[in-house]
Amino acid sequence: MKITCKYSKDSRTLTLYFPEEFDTTMLADASVTTAKLANDSITTAKLSNDSITTLKIVDAAVESVKIATASITGAKVATEAIGSSHLVDALITTAKIANLAVSTDKLADLIITAGKLATNAVTETKILNSAITNVKLANLAVDTDKLNALSVTAAKLAGAVTDDIAQGISDAETAQGAAEDAQGDATTALSSLSDIAADDKVTPVEKLTAKQLWDTIVVEGTATTGTLPVQATAFSVADTDFDTAYAELNTYLNTTIEVFANMSTATTIVRATWDTAWKNYYDERTKLLNAIASAVTSGSPQAVTWLTDAGVLATLDVIDTAQIVDLAVGNAAIANAAVTNAKIANLAVDTAQIAAGAIESAKIADLAVGTAAIALGAIGTAKIANAAILEAKIDDAAVTTVKISDAAIVSAKIADLAVIDAKIGSVAANKIVAANLSAINADLGTITAGIAKSSDDKLTIDFNNKWLKVWDAQGTPVLRVHLGYIA
């Protein structure tokens, strides 16, 4: 390259020659300024490694297309740099959430449904006081084990309970009475039957006695329909041995010896066989009646059933106990009938948890209401069915004076000769009805009025008219003495 230049001293021309190209050694340091660079003259190849620092990049200059795939690592992201608006919907999956990372304040209201709760996750400490209302309890969920002692007060008993308590008491008494009478009935019947068989024959007159006993047995002993098999079924008492004894007696009497086929002639029998057949039946009858009485007096509560609830919560599977803050589960969070029997701790339900009138008859086991179960003053008059309190239910000396209302003891309630001298405080004159008072031995004090007579009417003292008269003992008495006022 040739450059021609002139200088003015003598107007001479000076021609300078330079190389065709410049290298770095020909440039002074910092001689290439921004103004010397042509547009787009600095390409990637012109840049040395790590030469582009943060200060060299204009804000917002690095767009998505400028960033290589997977080049943004965790170390490249500043703390709290990623906000909600930077996340795609449903991007945060279960695997991205650390255990115990979701606390109460992270959950929206009403987001935890029943389907998200693990079995047994809601423990007693998770439930707010008074959160379990009546509608939260499944039918039959509160059984005997769940009730605290003395928690069923009078106010908790439904009106229908009293009738069924009375019926339960009556049934128990009937069964117990039948059991107690069974042995006596058997002894009486067997004694009579043994006498009949004494001469190894049953006469027409004896057949009438035996037939009466047999007719009673048919009513009570017939398999399935007899009164005793029906009771046994009702109280889940096995009656196989009883049914067998009845069938064997029936076969012996009506098939083997046909004792009742002809009531006008005598039937020959073997006394030992006759006695054994009858005795086997009465022995099994006594055993069955005792078993029924035992079943009635030890009735068991009904089995319980329960319901559950279900729901959906994002991608969570279940919420277990560890995830629920103590007392976090309030009434509104519990589905109706969600609290089943298995969820209630024994003795957790006391009086305060039972609504007034909630305990109906069907909820009370037969004979469950004993003395220890009744709080003082708990059973008011309204809770007792008419005629429910039988004599057998009243303990000796239980009815004291304060238990008897005024004027309640009427004449019909007092046994003959029950009112003895020690029981009488005073008797007014108009309460005495007697032909004479000869039995009275008393200091009468001063007598100021009335008439006194001897038993034969021969002596009369009239205090009102102030005279004394004496008659003789003739057939027609004659007045012999007259003292005092003479009219």
Image: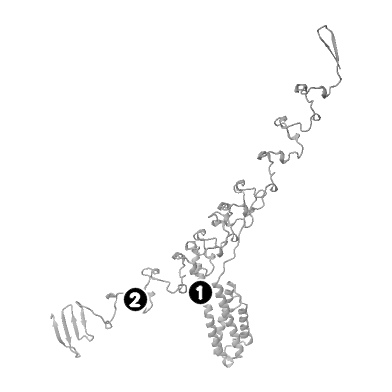
Locate residue 354, reporting x and y percent.
51, 60
In the image, which disc is placed on residue 462? none
Q: Is residue 172 left or right of residue 62?
A: left
The one nearer the camera, 138 or 264, is 138
The relative height of residue 31 versus residue 122 in the rendered view (above or below) is above
The relative height of residue 209 versus residue 319 in the rendered view (above or below) is below
Mark 1: secondary structure: helix
Pick out the residue farthest to the bottom: 199
Name the residue rendered at 48%, 69% in the picture.
371
Q: Quadrant of residue 465?
A: bottom left
Locate residue 260, reporting x and y percent.
59, 86
- Mark found first going from the N terminus, 2 or 1: 1
The one nearer the camera, 160 or 263, is 160
* Residue 169 appears in the picture as rendered: yes
Locate residue 301, reporting x and y percent.
57, 67
In the image, which disc is placed on residue 173? 1
Mark 2: secondary structure: helix
In the image, which disc is placed on residue 423? 2
The one nearer the camera, 35 or 194, is 35
Locate residue 410, reporting x and y percent.
37, 72
Name the residue rendered at 85%, 21% in the picture.
21
| Mark 2 or 1, closer to the camera | 2
